[in-house]
Image (cartoon, helix red, strand yellow):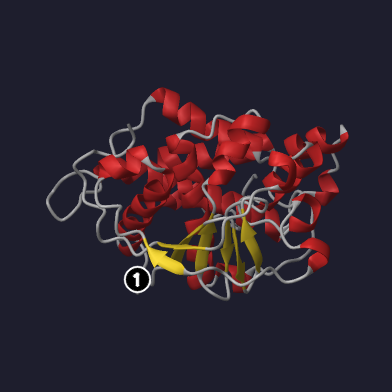
């Protein structure tokens, strides 16, 4: 188990929103999986390749929104992906409140099928992402099952927390001005986009490195100390979303000048660097830093 069963996550403000919708044919092929993983962790909306709104049209209106009031304890988070996302929200906010002056939490939305956002359609055909204009994180937990079934990633509990922590990292970059200071300057191995993504990986690692020390109001630790197997699972997730790995899967060749997120080795390194050494090593924009 990842969460302590007795931990209190009842203070979560995570919402569930959307309408039930499955990817056509019950799955996606190699191109679809590449689109899924490219979109994952802050990539562009590629639903036109794998489903979602056809022809680039706006999706139907959402069928409603409700809070995850049923997600009250760590036991709920261990048993249910939606509640795991709600628990992650609570622990991430606890962590970042301690490290960012004037911290303002993002919204957290668990997507049921698909829903419209200011950054495009949120669905399991897009993957987790952060929408800066809304200061909101969107995740369809079905995405994890797709990764397990069709992309060879284990996408276990700690890997899921790494993914959510990465999206929170983008929120931190947004509210602390990193995104404004280092705007998009194109693609490539040293581009701002790659540095942004690797820093978010480092932030996720730093959070998970300290997470076992964070406690609820009753003094109960939220999350148990990760096992070696769980850490290996999180590192596996970082490997899966490397630019070079994605390009090899899609076309059999690697084009560094088109990198947007960093190589598999870079993503693994920066996650591990944050996990072992904390937030102080996460400045991927520092002069002379070796990505």
**Could you say which quadrant of the image residue 114 lies in?**
bottom right
Q: Which residue is mark 1?
A: 101
Residue 220 appears at what percent x and percent y?
16, 45
Residue 135 appears at what percent x and percent y?
51, 71
**Could you say which quadrant of the image residue 52 lies in?**
bottom right
Residue that appears at 62% across and 50% down: 124
Residue that appears at 66% across and 41% down: 241
Please tell me how crowded label 1 is: few (under 14), some (14-19), or many (20+) other residues with Cα within 10 Å: few
Residue 13 appears at what percent x and percent y?
34, 65
Quadrant (top left/top right/bottom left/bottom right) for the N terminus: top left
Residue closest to the far top: 229
Question: Which structural element holds mark 1?
Answer: loop
- 100 sits left or right of 154 in the view: left
User: Relative to 95, is 252 above or below?
Assistant: above
User: Relative to 209, is 97 above or below?
Assistant: below
Residue 192 appears at what percent x and percent y?
69, 60
User: Relative to 30, is 55 above or below?
Assistant: below
Residue that appears at 34% across and 38% down: 78
Quadrant (top left/top right/bottom left/bottom right) for the C terminus: top right
- 164 sits left or right of 290 in the view: left
Count of numbered circles on the image: 1
Residue that appears at 64% across and 39% down: 266
Of 276 and 132, which appears nearest the observer?
132
Residue closest to the far left: 218
Decide if residue 123 is in sight here.
yes
Decide if residue 287 is in sight here.
no
């Amino acid at each position: 188990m990842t969460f302590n069963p007795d931990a209190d996550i009842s203070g979560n403000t995570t919402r569930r929103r959307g309408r039930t919708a499955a990817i056509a044919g019950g799955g996606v092929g190699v191109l679809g999986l590449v689109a899924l993983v490219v979109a994952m962790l802050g990539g562009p909306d590629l639903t036109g390749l794998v489903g979602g709104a056809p022809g680039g049209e706006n999706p139907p209106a959402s069928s409603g929104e409700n809070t995850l009031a049923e997600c009250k304890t760590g036991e709920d988070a261990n048993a249910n992906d939606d509640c795991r996302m709600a628990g992650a929200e609570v622990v991430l906010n606890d962590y970042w409140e301690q490290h960012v002056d004037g911290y303002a939490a993002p919204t957290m939305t668990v997507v049921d099928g698909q829903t419209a956002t200011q950054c495009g359609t949120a669905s399991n055909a897009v993957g987790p992402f952060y929408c800066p204009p809304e200061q909101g994180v969107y995740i369809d937990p079905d995405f994890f099952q797709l990764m397990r079934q069709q992309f060879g990633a284990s996408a276990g509990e700690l890997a899921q927390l790494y993914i959510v922590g990465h999206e929170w990292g983008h929120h931190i970059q947004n509210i602390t001005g990193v995104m404004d200071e280092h705007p998009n300057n194109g693609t490539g191995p040293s581009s701002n986009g790659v540095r942004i993504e690797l820093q978010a990986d480092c932030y996720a690692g730093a959070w998970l490195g300290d997470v076992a020390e964070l406690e609820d109001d009753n003094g109960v630790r939220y999350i148990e100390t990760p096992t070696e197997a769980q850490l290996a699972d999180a590192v596996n997730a970082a490997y899966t979303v490397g630019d070079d790995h994605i390009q090899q899967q899609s076309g059999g060749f690697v084009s560094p000048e088109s990198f947007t997120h960093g190589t598999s080795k870079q993503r693994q390194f920066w996650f591990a660097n944050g996990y072992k050494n904390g937030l102080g090593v996460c400045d991927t924009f520092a002069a002379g830093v070796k990505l």
